[in-house]
Amino acid sequence: MSNKVFELMKEMEHEQVVFCHDPKSNLKAIIAIHNTTLGPALGGTRMWNYASDDEAVVDALRLSRGMSYKAAISGLNLGGGKAVIIGDPSLKSEALWRRYGKFVNSLNGKYITAEDVNTSASDMEYIHLETKHVTGIPEYMGGSGDPSPFTAYGVFVGMKACAHKQWGSDNLSGKKILVQGVGHVGQYLVGHLVEAGAKVYITDINAERIKETSNKFPVEFVEPADMLSLDIDIYAPCALGATVNSETIPLLKCPIIAGAANNQLAEEKIHGRQLIDKGIIYAPDFLINAGGLINVAAEASGSYNREKVTKDVEKIYNRILDIFSLSEKENITTQEAAMRIAQKRIDDMANVKSRL
């Protein structure tokens, strides 16, 4: 296990991985810090029943690397980090979060946490009792609250940019769109799409989320096993990653993939090229889903302005169009184009900081 961790850290260029364990509160957490060239590593904490510790480590490493690129391409002075807690989300407790908060605090601000999959603003409130290095805390405590609406809005804006590229118009009225995963972000995205006049299909493994979303919006439910057979305009993965892979790509019947999930491509180089060969436009996940990070970054800065955050999130539209232009010009995948721009900013700032 230890050899594998160091090999993966070297391969993905990570700075630090912290393993946190407290048997009394059933805490098993991994904090991965990828790169702090631009500033402290900011990234959410997700809680998931991972099949193995190895799976959790890989998830933390991939997610934290994505956060470095997300911050860099969004023009934020932040590094990339992410944390995962291994366990059943239904069993989380005040003691677990407060003990975890102490571990976050021990890093002295090198890592700032926030919400992610299966965590909420109320969980951040418990963490805040033990450390100031947390964002997304409730508004009544001076925070910005749930960042999900901004993530969803950024995806919606990015989806419109994709539509403009593919069809010459960013009007989504009448477009058939599948949202896979209707958690916090997915539901807010559905709301934007319905308001825009799209025909929305939803799928999720959680029956309660399906019921809740269906009661709120005029949507059509599709069984997860049947979603790839849909003839749609846009596929929006908004659950866990790697749904775009060698098995699913041949089955996809859509000209655009634009969603909120992290690490949507199972193998970035292989599957990014396969999408190009099939004529499918792909919006790089760490760019299109950056709205939530932009929001909590503003909160962390100490000068939060909701109107300014909204305008900053809307910049995703032109950034995506720039990525498409670079991809075509250099004959590279959109994922590679986005990573190249993000890495260049990191390298340029590293050079600036190394000089007197």
Image (tube, rainbow, N blue to C red):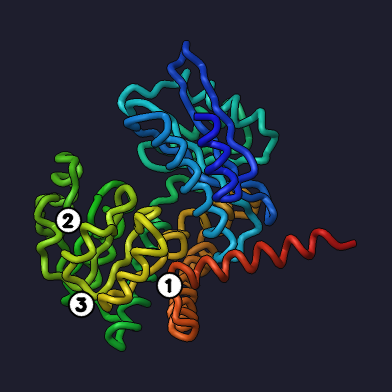
Q: Are marks 3 and 1 in contact (CB under 8 Å)?
A: no
Q: Nearest the camera: 163 or 80?
A: 80
Relative height, residue 319 to residue 164 (above, below): above
Per the image, the residue denoted by label 3 is 173
- Residue 320 in the figure: left or right of residue 185: right
Decide if residue 197 is in sight here: no
Q: Nearest the camera: 128 or 20?
A: 20
Per the image, the residue denoted by label 1 is 334
Q: Element under label 3?
A: loop
Q: Nearest the camera: 273 or 23?
A: 273
- Residue 226 in the figure: left or right of residue 48: left
Q: Amino acid at mark 3?
A: Ser
Per the image, the residue denoted by label 2 is 202
**Where does the image place residue 279, in percent across and percent down from the top left?**
27, 78
Residue 249: quadrant of the picture: bottom left
Q: Are marks 1 and 2 in contact (CB under 8 Å)?
A: no
Residue most extreme to the right:
356
Q: Earlier in the sequence, mark 3 or mark 1?
A: 3
Marks 3/1: CA–CA distance? 25 Å
In what quadrant of the picture does the C terminus appear?
bottom right
Residue 31: quadrant of the picture: top right
